Amino acid sequence: MPRINLLPHRQRDRANKRREFGLAAIGAAMMAALVTVVTGIFFNAAIEHQKERNDLLTKEIGELEKQIADIDSLDAQKQRTLARMGIIERLQRSRPEVVHVFDQIARQIPDGVYLTNVKQTDRRIELKGVAQSSTRVSTFMKNIESSPWLAEPQLQVIETLKGAKQGAEFTIYATQRSLTPDDDVKAKRGPKAPSAGAGASP
């Protein structure tokens, strides 16, 4: 019976399988490399796009911060302007008030009282003078209390004069009233006349 040598066939089959395996491995490696390259390109493009967006956002944020700073500056300027307008308005209102206040001081002085100095600081008024007696100083303070333009009289100093000059030196502090428009109208009609005994000698 003839013998068949299968060894060459098996060797060729093994060589074919090794070649096929090598080709498959090379194909898989190339595919993996291609996927890696494509993935890298995709992620690099995404990163560049995000960087461009971040740069744009940073630029826009800078513009917004600049606009906010401009708005804050304008708001501060507006507040300063309003404050100046308020001061000017108060000064304009206070000009006629000064006339009324000095008119009231003159009206409320009883007989026997003479002022030597009048000083106003804001709404605080300092009245210095000489009176024939301390009773007339008290009458002057009561008249101030009843005035529509003056309030809160406070006797700070009173000294009795001796010698040829009889009487008392005094210093009174009063406050200018803040009148409403209705009060201002009433005040302009004139104060109440002092009582008949206001200027009477003690």
Image: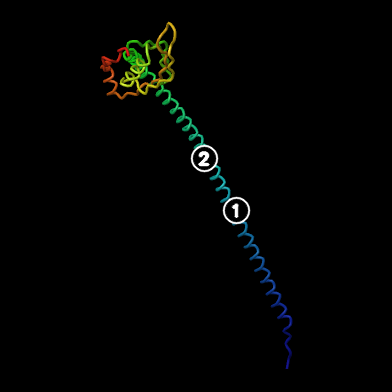
Q: CA distance from mark 1 to mark 2?
A: 30 Å
Crowding near the residue tagged with mark 2, few <14, some 14–19, many ≥20 C-alpha atoms within 10 Å = few
Give percent across and percent down for residue 76: 46, 29
Q: Would residue 200 be found to the left or right of residue 6 on screen?
A: left
Residues marked 1 and 2 touching at CB (< 8 Å)? no
* Residue positioned 46% across, 27% down in the render: 77
Residue 23 higher or lower than 54, as above or below: below
Residue kind at label 2, given as amino acid type: Ile
Q: What x and y, as percent, mark residue 22?
A: 68, 69
Q: Residue at x 38, y 12 (%)?
A: 131
Mark 2 residue element? helix
In the image, which disc is placed on residue 30?
none
Q: Under tag 1, what secondary structure?
A: helix
Question: Which corner quadrant holds the C terminus?
Answer: top left
> What mark, if any, has residue 61 been given in the picture?
2
x, y percentage for residue 57? 52, 43
Q: Residue at x 55, y 48 (%)?
A: 50
Query: Residue 187 in the image: x percent, y percent?
Result: 28, 19
Q: Name, please, the residue furthest toward the bottom.
A: 1
Left or right of 165? Residue 188 is left
The answer to whether residue 33 is above or below residue 140 is: below
User: From the image, which quarter does the N terminus lie in?
Assistant: bottom right
Q: Nearer the viewer, residue 1 or 32?
A: 32
* Depicted 37 relative to depicted 81: above or below: below
| Kind of residue at disc 1 | Ile
Mark 1 or 2: in front is 2
Tell me which label, 1 or 2, sits earlier in the chain.
1
On the image, which quarter does residue 134 sit in?
top left
Q: Is residue 6 left or right of residue 114?
A: right
**Farthest-out residue, top:** 164
Q: Which residue is mark 1?
A: 41
Disc 1 packing (10 Å; few <14; some 14–19; many ≥20)? few
